[in-house]
Image: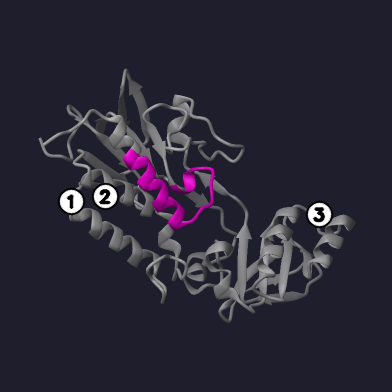
Amino acid sequence: MSALDTADTVLDCLVIGGGPGGLTAATYLARFGRELVIVDAGHSRARWIPASHNCPGFPFGVAGNELLGRFREHVAQYHVPVVEDRIERLEREGDIFIASTSSRKWRAQSIILATGVVDLLPDIEGAEDAIASGAIRLCAVCDGYEAKDDAIAVLGRCEEAIGHAEFLRTFSRDVTAIATDGLANDPALRDRAAASGVVLLAAPDRWRLVDGGCEAQLPDGSRRRFDTLYPVLGSDVQSFLLAPLGAATDDAGALIVDDHMQTSVPGVYAIGDVVSALNQISVAVGQAAIAATAVHGRLPRNPR
């Protein structure tokens, strides 16, 4: 039986998710001499990144897919199997976890969950192309610097949009918060926005891509073009696999972990954006090192 077909054997660890966090954890575990498999659905949030300029070691920037390629190349040196599939169910049988896709299963003593989040995007035709060009950006912490002096819009619930707009005022004088919840005329919120140098507008009737930016058609018939649009519409945290096991989450559905990245389910660890923490590649990579080392320490010794 190959390393990929492990339904009748027990892995030391199954890593679910092949983004920067999952691939880093797998690299550590492989170097610890552990038997593992990565199962990856191919939806890493990192693939959206046109160019990251705050990723350590890449002073001139690196595209998300290039970065993922480097992480994959690294783990491939240790012959870790990477299976392109989606885990649909995670169960526990005594001390063993059973992870299932629609057609196969793996058994493992421990799990590292690195399934991330799925961003909710505005209704704009060609949104993926807009992300690739920088007309839509998903992370002000990552790339607010690259939007420096742009005409920036932040789209979301009023208070959240204003909060993100205030953060982005570090980078631009021209920042607009666009409220999706009908509170754009609330006097206290308007005063808060004005005090921060932020324009506050009601949600537009429609969006479209124009001249490399995003144009909003406002309810009064006027149009406003922005170089960059930051949607803060929330995200779908991919923690559903642990729901049947009773894993603790925060109000947004992100997993709560201890200092070793272990969830409230013993033997299951979580890293990256699926965890309640700062959503950054550098954070996910650090969490991966912590989790993989904890998994290695938890497992029976494996002397040569």
Residue lying at 14% horizontally and 34% vertically, measured from the top left = 303
Instruction: Say whether residue 302 is visible.
Output: yes
Residue lying at 49% horizontally and 43% vertically, measured from the top left = 275
Are the residues flagged by discs 2 and 1 in contact, CB closer than 8 Å?
yes
**Residue named by callout 3:** 183
What is the number of the mark on residue 78?
1
Q: Nearer the viewer, residue 170 or 225?
A: 170
- What is the chief secondary structure element of the magenta stretch? helix
What's the CA distance linking mark 1 and mark 3?
Answer: 54 Å
Q: Nearer the viewer, mark 3 or mark 2?
A: 2
**Left or right: 223 as drawn, with respect to 276:** right
User: Which residues are the magenta region?
Assistant: 272-293
What is the number of the mark on residue 27?
2
Point out the tag, 3 or 2, that comes first from the N-terminus.
2
Residue 168 against residue 211 in the figure, above or below: above
Residue lying at 31% horizontally and 51% vertically, measured from the top left = 23
Percent position (x, y) of residue 265? 43, 27
Q: Is residue 285 magenta?
A: yes
